[in-house]
Amino acid sequence: MAKIKVGIVGCGFIANRKHLPMLTQHQDVEIVAFCDIIRERAEASCKQFGASDAKVYEDYREVIGRKDIDVVHVCTPNSSHAEISVAALQGGKHVMCEKPMAKTSAEAKAMLDAAKASGKKLTIGYQNRFRSDSQFIKSLCDKGELGDIYLGK
């Protein structure tokens, strides 16, 4: 089976502490591109987590332009999430975008529209929904065991 090729856009704290360590635990994943506007950050991430032939970039458009990349992780400042995610989806990449999804509902809608038009998957890093305790509570809600829920905290 071919490995899933991943490009990381934004090589700061969240990428280095969460995304990259998790991705390297999967044998079917290969991290082949590292992008950051501060080249040294991308180089350091590449050295620690990258495949032997991984490349470093300062412009996310170069990552998106690579034909061999399947998935792009968007780990940039919040203000750029929508722009990069839409471009990646339009470039034929699946996208895992950090939270928050976007600055405005219009940006979020543009992301959803790009995913629908491209047929690619878009996911946002709302990881709590995948925790076992969250899944358990959700199953109770789905079964109607908690009654009519109108507020949660």
Image (cartoon, rainbow, N blue to C red):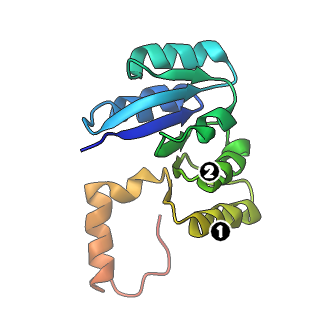
Q: Quadrant for residue 35, please give it.
A: top right
Q: Quadrant for residue 115, please give it.
A: bottom right
| Left or right of 46 in this view: 90 | right
Instruction: Return the x and y of residue 81 as percentages of the image width and height.
Output: 66, 46
Front position in the image: 82 or 119: 119
Q: Residues within 10 Å of mark 1 (few under 14, many from 20)?
A: some
Residue denoted by label 1: 113
| Left or right of 152 in this view: 61 | right
Q: Looking at the image, is mark 1 or mark 2 earlier in the sequence?
A: 2
Amino acid type at circle 1 is Asp
**Which residue is at 66% across, 54% downward?**
86
Instruction: Return the x and y of residue 116 as percentages of the image width and height.
Output: 58, 69
Q: Quadrant for residue 143, please give it.
A: bottom left
| Left or right of 45 in this view: 1 | left
| Left or right of 75 in this view: 69 | left
Q: Are marks 1 and 2 in contact (CB under 8 Å)?
A: no
The numbered dot on residue 91 is 2
- The Cα atoms of the two marked residues, 1 and 2, are separated by 14 Å
Amino acid type at circle 2 is Gly
**Which residue is at 51% across, 13% downward?**
44
SS of the residue under disc 2: loop
